[in-house]
Image (cartoon, coloured by chain):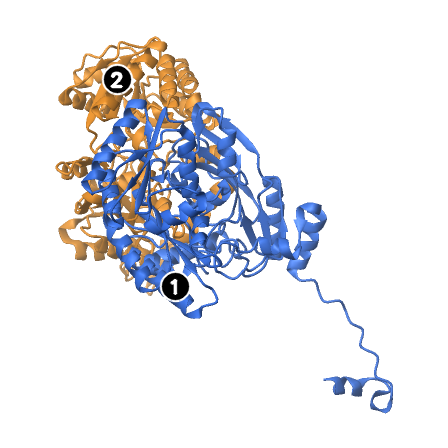
Chain colours: A orange, B blue
Amino acid sequence: MADKQAESLPGGAWSDEPPPPPPREPPAPTAVDTVKTALAARFGNRYSANESVREQHGHTLTWLPNQKPDAVVYPQTTEEVAEIVTLCAQHKVPVIPFGTGTSLEGHVNAPHGGICVDTSLMKRIVAINVDDLDCVAEAGVTRKELNEALRHTGLFFPIDPGADASIGGMASTRASGTNAVRYGTMKENVLALKVVTPSGEIMKTARRARKSSAGYDLTRLFVGAEGTLGLITEITLKLYGLPEAITAGICPFPSVKAACDATILTIQSGLPVARIELLDELSVKAVNLHSKLGLPETPLLLVEFHGTDAGAKEQAERFGEIAADFGGGPFTWASKTEDRTKLWQARHDAYWACFTLRPGAKAIATDVCVPISRLAECVEQTKADIAASGLVGPIVGHVGDGNFHVNLLVDMTDEDEIARAEGFLERLVLRGVDMEGTCTGEHGVGQAKMKYLPKEHDPAALEMMRTLKRALDPDGIMNPGKVVEV
Amino acid sequence: MADKQAESLPGGAWSDEPPPPPPREPPAPTAVDTVKTALAARFGNRYSANESVREQHGHTLTWLPNQKPDAVVYPQTTEEVAEIVTLCAQHKVPVIPFGTGTSLEGHVNAPHGGICVDTSLMKRIVAINVDDLDCVAEAGVTRKELNEALRHTGLFFPIDPGADASIGGMASTRASGTNAVRYGTMKENVLALKVVTPSGEIMKTARRARKSSAGYDLTRLFVGAEGTLGLITEITLKLYGLPEAITAGICPFPSVKAACDATILTIQSGLPVARIELLDELSVKAVNLHSKLGLPETPLLLVEFHGTDAGAKEQAERFGEIAADFGGGPFTWASKTEDRTKLWQARHDAYWACFTLRPGAKAIATDVCVPISRLAECVEQTKADIAASGLVGPIVGHVGDGNFHVNLLVDMTDEDEIARAEGFLERLVLRGVDMEGTCTGEHGVGQAKMKYLPKEHDPAALEMMRTLKRALDPDGIMNPGKVVEV
């Protein structure tokens, strides 16, 4: 190339002087550069292309490689989000919505680069309608912040994934948690959403009525879509009256199977248990270490009942009887609020507690959900598989829903162990799906579970998901590389 | 034309004989004729193009003109439905799903002709999973048939629109009823659907797990889509344990406002009321006449509590106290099962009962739903509007949800009255929507409420609904002329 060029130049091969370099045009700015420049000018110190900020906004909570966005921007209003998305749409630059970054399956990675829209400055609580048992809040409000704002109203918002996640992120991943057995998941508790569409338009999905039959359910279309169809900026949520009485307690069981069987009967008996959480012996050990508790290191159920004084007591007594039928007990009460709070905080910290079992390991948190009649069998087989695979993986679960989590602790320098972990994960999904269950009860698909969707869904259903994605986001700019590849 | 032809014929103008008629080809069969011929051959006596059968399958329960389909076919399996839809898709012939024909807004009319798919032979109960509190049933099973099948299981299915509707139709219209305040609507109670897509493919929308985050919520996309995106053939439903104790009763109030205010406080207090139904004085009169009851002819609340013996009793006592605060009472119990059954049957027959108030009139049943804090105001204004408009319109309502019905009784020979009724309907919708409510809480859009969707939804939301329709049903064959026009 250089030679050819030299030959064609005046003076060429006969000159001793190297030929002057050809005049170089600056490279044409790429689409993403154009967007970055415009956003930097528009958002000032609410914009960052700093390396470490970008990395913090790539994926953090799994073993997936971090894929950072090209820049991060911090809007304060829905209108600003619309501005950002409109700009990105004009230049076909990816938009990655970001709440608190606590999702577990690579939801916030940026495999195709693009602009991360961090909603953490969108903290406005727009309305608390005490009389209607609902509220309207911006996407960046976390579940604890919301409950703090509700503190003097007598109402609460029950959905509680382990992390103090943002309600926007929770809506986007169809999150649930320990209270779902009684209060439902985000699917049942979102009344309406304000969304910025992939073309940058602002729309509400529904009004504030408790129920409606007025057209397609756009609300449910966005709940669980993981930001791939639009960006949720504001959420109208159902609230609940704080129960008059709460009784909670701990019940040890001789085996995980016995605990699961007691759970099944509790649900089948129609006991309106508010929380029923399984910790296997390994999880109890981790929680004891992490939260300085002295729980008996056998499989445990943590339970909670909400109701009137008489009602909650009656429920707890019935549960005690059921537990005893399966060799469980004694059922010990945590009557004081601070004991209860400590107990549930320990449960919520189970993810972090696991690291005490194997410091330095990486956690691979996964969840499946099966019809409750298959729960004991599924958990037992999974425990056996963990043992046979030579892995460390404590199990916790929202067992009232048939939903449980395995938190594999993996030495990422050991390729053989990684391969065994991957094999285990695949078998876990297939086991759950074979039992008419789902590959994820509440974590979502993100990047990591995309490959499992064809195991769970009919080809026509998966193709319909792709059709929806293509129809609503024809340029594929919204959180690309997640849920379904089109 | 005749002259021209004559000139060109041999013999032409010179012959006395009229020219022989030109050889006539039989008219090319239309697409719908082709489909009809194929269906007749395939389905034999499960196919009909009989005039009265077609008319019965056009719209029946409103004042909308009957628009009959070209033929009616009665499949027995999902595979047969797929065959029918595939054939219609090939010829771009409309498909109109039909359950029991009890929808209220013109859902089963055939404005563009086409094939009505009557699911009344699809009565199979595929599975009752007692341990999982769910069941799988074909679309043609009615809610009463399902509960009959569940009779010896200790479980029940709570959703109860007035009519003994099919569960396929109930899913399609996002139906609810008197129990929704406690058990939710079809939206919350459908776990999964089997659907025939507009191209004739069979797919399941989800598996049987209680919750899932595995991709877009296809289930909720079809619930409430009124058959415009596909045809529901099989439904997986949540079930509930029969409560140990049921207490029910009647509470008269001095005014509709007092009854609504008592309802609001009941809900706000977190009393887990299972049913709380308003009948205004005119509805009570109609129900008394129709069902031979002796209820006091003042505004009434019919309430029901589910729970343990102690729990249900406690709830009923609290309600009695709340009612008294608003001048309501005495709260009289219907403790015997047969009294309760009679009471609720009377409530469910309220639609039919209304005709006793004005024999020969047509009923225009409509419903709106508002945030409960606005309920008393909305009902009061509506009553005043009925009076000012010189109309007869008893009001009943699932007031725990903020949802109420007006059943206008209109003399269809009186054009002035019809015009007043139309004006009233429009004002009712606008009133509900202005109070952050919806133009329909549970009846659906059908044909009659299409014009109100732009009052309720943002232009971008409505356009998104059209985009969904176009993407999933590009030829527009599924129940055309309903929900959204594309």
Marks 2/1 in contact by CB < 8 Å: the verdict is no
The answer, for residue A13, to whether it is visible in the render is: no
Q: Nearer the viewer, mark 2 or mark 1?
A: 1
* Left or right of A31, for residue B116: right
Callout 1 environment at 10 Å: few (<14), some (14 to 19), or many (20+)?
Answer: many
Which quarter of the rendering shows the N terminus of chain B?
Answer: bottom right
* Left or right of A305, for residue B154: right
Residue A65 lies, in percent from the top left, at 31, 34
Q: Tell me which amino acid carries mark 1.
A: Ala
Residue that label 2 marks: A358
Residue A207 lies, in percent from the top left, at 30, 51
* Left or right of A165, for residue A6: right
Residue A317 lies, in percent from the top left, at 28, 16
Residue at the image position 28 percent from the left and 53 percent from the top: B379
Residues flagged by tags 2 and 1 on a common chain: no
Q: CA distance from mark 2 to mark 1?
A: 73 Å
Tell me, for residue A226, which label it has, or none. Answer: none
| Residue B80, quarter of picture | top right
Residue B211 lies, in percent from the top left, at 38, 32
Q: Chain of mark 1?
A: B
Tell me, for residue B421, which label it has, or none. Answer: 1
Residue at the image position 47 percent from the left and 64 percent from the top: B412
Q: Find the residue positioned furthest to the bottom.
A: B14
The answer, for residue B75, to whether it is visible in the render is: yes
